[in-house]
Image: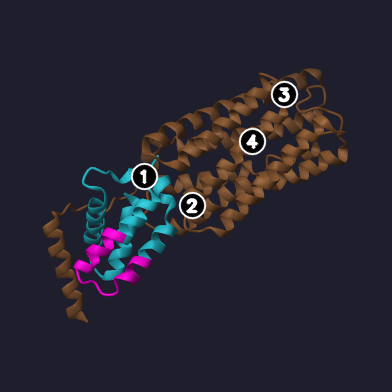
Amino acid sequence: MTIIAHLGDKLASLISISAPAARGLIKLAIKDEFGPFRQHPQINFEEYKSILENSLRKRLKNLNVPDVNNAINQMLDELTLKQSLITMEAL
Amino acid sequence: MTMLNDILFIVFVNFFGIFIVTLLINSIFFLIKGFKKRMTNIILIGFGFGLLSIGFISNLVFNLGQLFQEFTIFISFVFVIIFTTLTFHKNRRFIPNIILISVIILGIVQIGFFIYSILGTWTLSLYYIRVWLDLPYTLLTFNWLAFSSYSSYRVLKSQKVNPWIKMRYKMVAIFSFIFGFNSIPEFFQPPGTSWAESDNIVSLLVFGITTTLVIVFSLGFALAWIMPTSFKNFLDRNYELDEEIEYQEKELIELIKKQLSQKDEKL
């Protein structure tokens, strides 16, 4: 859950919502991409990237968040910076 | 002196045996977890460690020769580099590629030296050239992993991450750093002696220092990755988890809309 927490915190600071709400939005984006049965430890870097670029982008647009592209790019930078957490917390 | 030599030899051989067994345990653990969690990087390091131990066993137990051992070392070093790239450097291409290409070239050069030692005339100068080139080969492979783990740790050390995860970063960095230097003792191998010659104290000490470095690495690396739950709990004893609120989708969307409109009002 650590990587989701970090992505959630980043999203919260970018669009000024609470951290629990931002984490919830990321979990919804994961559900949009892979359905309800895919567990977080089975998601790899490319899949997180695709979640941010596709379903999270759509979710943010539907919420009328301004400058979605910038937010997504910053989220992708955060994912790249902290990518090792995906492996380090998985075992 | 002979008795001391014999005792040291037995101790160091046991160290080496423990190193190989620990590598195999690491390998099996990584392969099981990697396939279960569908993680390519973990599968690759599992194969890498497995090959490394097979290489040593095949040479020392089944006498298949140093060339086969060197080949397995080459493949496993390449797998360690790919593991480092896939774990720490996805989306960053330039430096990881340079390191991978350098290690492949240095590995091929090492294999070339071993082929020449069988087919050609082996000299002391060639030995030292090989050893000098073995140093960057090992240093690049394991210190790149150490550096990558330490750099990631530095990013995360003041952030909210479970202490056991931070400890894993530190352990991977420290033990890989130590392993990076395991080729240095080769410089002190007395000319005309074979590796681990029990009646030559210098050769024996070279073997001893090497086995000590590799056993520290393999046990430390095993503890870092096959970390017992009790140890994780001990490290996390003062760590407070953030409160997790589970929202229904509709409730969450309404909440976010409200928070976004509150932000707009403030502006």
User: In this structure image, what is the colour of chain B?
Assistant: brown
Badge number at residue B88: 2
Q: Which residue is mark 4?
A: B73
The subunit carrying tag 1 is: B
Badge number at residue B236: 1
Q: Secondary structure at mark 3?
A: helix
Q: Which residues are magenta?
A: A54-73
Q: Is residue B243 visible?
A: no
Would you say the residues marked 1 and 3 are in contact, meaning their CB atoms lie under 8 Å apart? no
Q: Position of residue A2 (x, y in %)?
A: 34, 51
User: In this structure image, what is the colour of chain A?
Assistant: cyan
Q: CA distance from mark 2 to mark 3?
A: 40 Å
Image colouring = by chain
The subunit carrying tag 4 is: B
Amino acid type, callout 3: Leu
Q: CA distance from mark 3 to mark 4?
A: 26 Å
| Image-based side of B3 in relation to A30, left or right | right
Same-chain check, marks 1 and 3: yes
Farthest residue in the front direction? B119
Q: Secondary structure at mark 2?
A: helix
Residue B133 lies, with reference to residue B212, above or below; the image says: below
Same-chain check, marks 1 and 4: yes
Q: Position of residue B36 (x, y in %)?
A: 37, 34
Q: CA distance from mark 2 to mark 1?
A: 24 Å
Of callouts 3 and 4, the N-terminal one? 3
Q: Secondary structure at mark 4?
A: helix
Q: CA distance from mark 2 to mark 4?
A: 22 Å
Residue A54 lies, with reference to residue B137, above or below; the image says: below
